[in-house]
Image (cartoon, coloured by chain):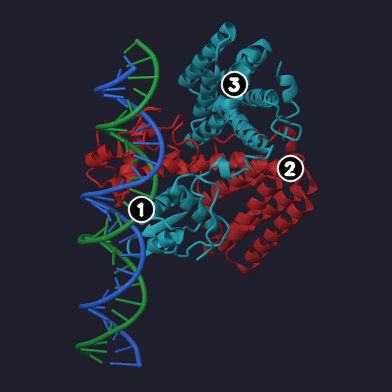
Chain colours: A cyan, B red, C blue, D green
DNA sequence: ATTGATCTGCTTGTCAGACAAGTTTTGCTA
DNA sequence: TAGCAAAACTTGTCTGACAAGCAGATCAAT
């Protein structure tokens, strides 16, 4: 059995145990398919009760690291941890580039979603977007918080693609950036004209989607994402400009 | 407290309990911020022991649905379940379109990754790709299994973007389709020329990335993804062709 | 000797009761 | 009424027990 090394104090014993075992698996100390030590052994090694070990394993099962069979034991999954996608372990949160990396992923997916929405949106989808836009317009004029409406607008576009997987993913990534929308919609953002600018970008996206113009929608979304990144201080110099085709330049005002 | 309705038998009591509570949260029966019933209450209502309830809650904590404070209780998280992304609950697995939806998401991300890789790849990245290509070439001529090399090739491209979040996501989505690559690399796939066709597409992607031509790389990836979808019987008629700009037509052989 | 069924020990799944640690409510006092 | 201390409650952990299922060992029959 691998060595036991305490991780940074999660003050919850089961958390400690599950993180430690997770580390064993991620580090390859326990290869896919191998049997974990028995619960009794683990509880003895960690110096905790079997209940704690069981809760830890319960976590690991939920995250797809292990699967257990009554009477046989618990085994490391073939592709441990890859039944779900978590940004927390995709990037090093401490790294200064982490936000930029995630934002780039969001940029890729949202520009594509805007283009798809333009060709697939229903009347009902447009109503949803219009409603969110209205709330944002109101927030701009009243200088109030529009983060929720902002979020709703992007989700409405994702929904208009008719692809539930895409919707869910955009909702997921978007929520990671909920905090990033604050500097646009707080008092300072209003004063600096950031809210107004964002609103103009949103309006342009909506017009293109309503008109069914996929190319213009992609470009409007591209501009919005780049500007949004700029507003929270992310460097976009190395982003892929390819989604914009040359002839799109003149297709937009 | 909400009504208790047994879900399809997961043969594990804690699984039943966690899925039921998860459903309460997803259906909005229990809004974010509200306190769950106490463990004692839950165990009584479900007719199970407190240990089972605790294991269920342990799962829910791992998936970001609830957070608990000793002495106070367990509370529904602000954005329940959205600290991780799972395809299983993004789409209805039973739906015939589920695979198509996920593949479309993969299409969006992989085409973008190919374009990025072209402008950011290092010598080392190219070596990785070359190595995987070689193994696939070998698999084609020997009529053996090349699914692993196929997977490695795509991961190598994702790695070349230098974006760990993107890498992780492509690895995640790609693994969901591990099975989909089998019909290309099994005996029938070799006989029907599917393996050879896929290989040609891969070679073209590599050439474009090695040449640093982002536009060509995106187009080669687009063709590969569309063909791959076609090989496993997914209808791509409504996919977004926008990533391909008009002038890319002549840029390729 | 090989095969087949049985048996025994081990492992996970569940239960019950207990105490420790931390939180919330209650109720008394000043 | 305000402040504070005790009591009641809730989660976290421990212990011991039994049921359900599995895997290797044992043994009988061919």
| Callout 1 touching callout 3 (CB < 8 Å) | no
Q: Chain of mark 3?
A: A
| Quarter where residue B18 is shown | top left
Q: CA distance from mark 2 to mark 1?
A: 57 Å
Q: Chain of mark 1?
A: A
Within-10-Å neighbours for mark 3: few <14, some 14–19, many 20+: some
- The answer to whether A198 appears left or right of A150 in the picture is right
Within-10-Å neighbours for mark 1: few <14, some 14–19, many 20+: some
Q: What residue is disc 1 on?
A: A51
- The answer to whether B166 appears left or right of A39 in the picture is right
Which element carries disc 3, helix, strand or loop? helix
| Quarter where residue B41 is shown | top left
- Residue A112 tag number: none
Q: Is residue D3 depicted above or below B166 in this figure?
A: above
Q: Residue at x 53, y 28 (%)?
A: A158
**Residue B19, x across and y down, in percent:** 34, 42
Quadrant location, the C terminus of chain A? top right
Whether residue B30 appears in this view of the structure is: yes
Which element carries disc 1, helix, strand or loop? helix
| Between discs 1 and 3, the one toward the N terminus | 1
**Nearer the observer, A68 or A45:** A45
**Nearer the observer, B26 or A91:** A91
Q: CA distance from mark 1 to mark 3?
A: 42 Å
Q: Nearer the viewer, mark 2 or mark 1?
A: 1
Determine the residue located farthest toward the top in the rendered image. Answer: A141
Q: What residue is disc 2 on?
A: B216
Q: Residue at x 67, y 12 (%)?
A: A193
- The answer to whether A116 appears left or right of A241 in the picture is left
């Amino acid at each position: 059995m691998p060595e036991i090394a305490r991780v940074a104090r999660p003050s919850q014993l089961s958390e400690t145990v599950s993180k430690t075992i997770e580390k064993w698996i991620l580090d390859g100390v326990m290869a896919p398919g191998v049997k974990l030590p028995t619960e009794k052994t683990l509880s003895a090694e960690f110096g905790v009760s079997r209940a704690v070990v069981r809760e830890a394993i319960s976590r690991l099962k939920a995250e797809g690291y292990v699967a257990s069979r009554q009477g046989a034991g618990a085994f490391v999954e073939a592709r441990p941890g890859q039944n779900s996608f978590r940004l927390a372990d995709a990037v090093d949160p401490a790294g200064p580039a982490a936000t930029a990396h995630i934002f780039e992923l969001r940029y890729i997916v949202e520009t594509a979603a805007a283009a798809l929405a333009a060709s697939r949106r229903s009347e009902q989808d447009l109503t949803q977007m219009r409603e969110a836009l209205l709330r944002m317009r109101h927030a701009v004029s009243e200088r109030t918080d529009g983060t929720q409406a902002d979020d709703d607008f992007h989700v409405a576009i994702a929904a208009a693609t008719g692809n539930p997987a895409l919707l869910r993913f955009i909702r997921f990534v978007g929520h990671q950036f909920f905090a990033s929308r604050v500097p646009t919609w707080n008092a300072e953002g209003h004063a600096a004209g950031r809210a107004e600018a964002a609103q103009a970008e949103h309006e342009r996206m909506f017009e293109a989607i309503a008109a069914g113009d996929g190319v213009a929608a992609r470009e409007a979304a591209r501009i919005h994402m780049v500007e949004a990144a700029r507003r929270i201080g992310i460097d976009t110099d190395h982003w892929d400009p390819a989604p914009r085709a040359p002839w799109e330049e003149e297709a937009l005002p």
